Image (tube, rainbow, N blue to C red):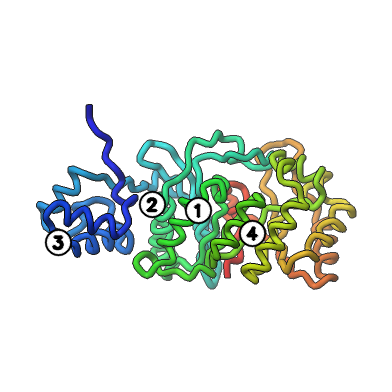
Amino acid sequence: MQIEKKDIRALSKEQLRDFFVANNDKAFRGNQVYEWLWSKGAHSFEDMTNVAKTTRSMLEENFVINHIKVDTMQRSNDGTVKNAVRLHDGLVVESVLIPTETRTTACVSSQVGCSLDCNFCATARLKRMRNLEPGEIYDQIMAIDKESRLYHNHPLSNIVFMGMGEPLMNYNNVIKAIDMITSPEGLGMSPKRIMLSTSGIPKMIKKMADDDVKFKLAVSLHSAIDETRAKIMPFSKNFPLKDLREALEYWYRKTKSKISYEYVVWKGINDDKASIDALVKFCKYVPCKVNLIEYNPIDDGEFQQASEESILAYIKALENIGVVVKVRRSRGKDIDAACGQLANKEADAV
């Protein structure tokens, strides 16, 4: 029976060094290979040109590099790029490059499908197949960085975890990927340029605070009324707003990092005065800003974009209490670059 080879990127630098010593080679060889895997983004062992051919053959015999492949790439008229990313087992996720005049943002996926049941989200209709490995998350960033340099003449500047999946339900792998993205041995990106967006899992928000993470936090809120939020996001019945509020207060006490609320206003669902008043009250608990997001309907069902008048009413009420509000218009409409529904918006990660 053929033994399945392990992805070499699952090994730490120390484990790689130990592997080479155990195979009668020099420990520093592990450093070389580690650099090829992460800083240089090698797709195969043959790419490692300063490693001896016999060593490359030994690596080939023992390991694989489960690198992603950009299956199809679509470019929008506004510069947005959508990637259909094929994984080593044939499954596909999406990632998106979102440009502005001053920066480019990568929207990346953390799971194949999603475990949650947000009724407005296209990804929620896909069964969660599996979590992405740290290397698969990292590869999405590397691919988008190359596209940013190619099409926009500068490196990737920001990252948002707003693609397929709930990042906090793949916590360990997401954290490992971010560690490599921010490491000098990886991409060396500042954690302040990374934003993780969650649907709001209180115990995991507290864990992030306890782990002293340095990236920013966004919460897909959509309503500050439990009954309405449960209609929009049925899983939230298990995470009532009082628990979410407590977790966010804990986050801010520990990190002193302001929270972003992602908030879509839908016609006949949360476009009334009671919904506005509830959000205003919720925003007083923790320093925050609000991104009001234009919705791309996924069908002709109940979730439809609210009127401009409703959006303006939200803006006025929030600005009256000193909350910064931004309206995020859809990007890449001509290629349907929805990346989980929320990621077709350029998000503040700085």
Q: Quadrant of residue 153?
A: bottom left
At label 1, counting other C-alpha atoms closer than 10 Å, the crowd grade (few under 14, some 14-19, many 20 or more) is many
Three-letter code, disc 3: Lys
Q: Residue at x 37, y 37 (%)?
A: 89
Residue 184 falls left or right of residue 205: left
Three-letter code, disc 2: Gly
For numbered disc 2, what is the local secondary structure?
A: helix
Q: Residue at x 42, y 47 (%)?
A: 133
At label 2, counting other C-alpha atoms closer than 10 Å, the crowd grade (few under 14, some 14-19, many 20 or more) is many
Pick the front one: 177 or 313: 177
| 3D distance between C-alphas at marks 3 and 2 | 25 Å
Circle 3 is placed at which residue position?
26
Circle 1 is placed at which residue position?
108
Three-letter code, disc 1: Val
Q: Earlier in the sequence, mark 3 or mark 2?
A: 3
Which mark lies nearer to you, 3 or 2?
3
In the rendered image, the residue lying farthest to the right is: 273
Residue 46 falls left or right of residue 229: left
Q: Earlier in the sequence, mark 4 or mark 3?
A: 3
Pick the front one: 96 or 41: 41
Residue 312 falls left or right of residue 136: right
Residue 79 falls left or right of residue 155: right
Tell me whether the residue at label 3 lies in contact with that at label 1, contact meaning CB atoms closer than 8 angstroms: no
Circle 2 is placed at which residue position?
135
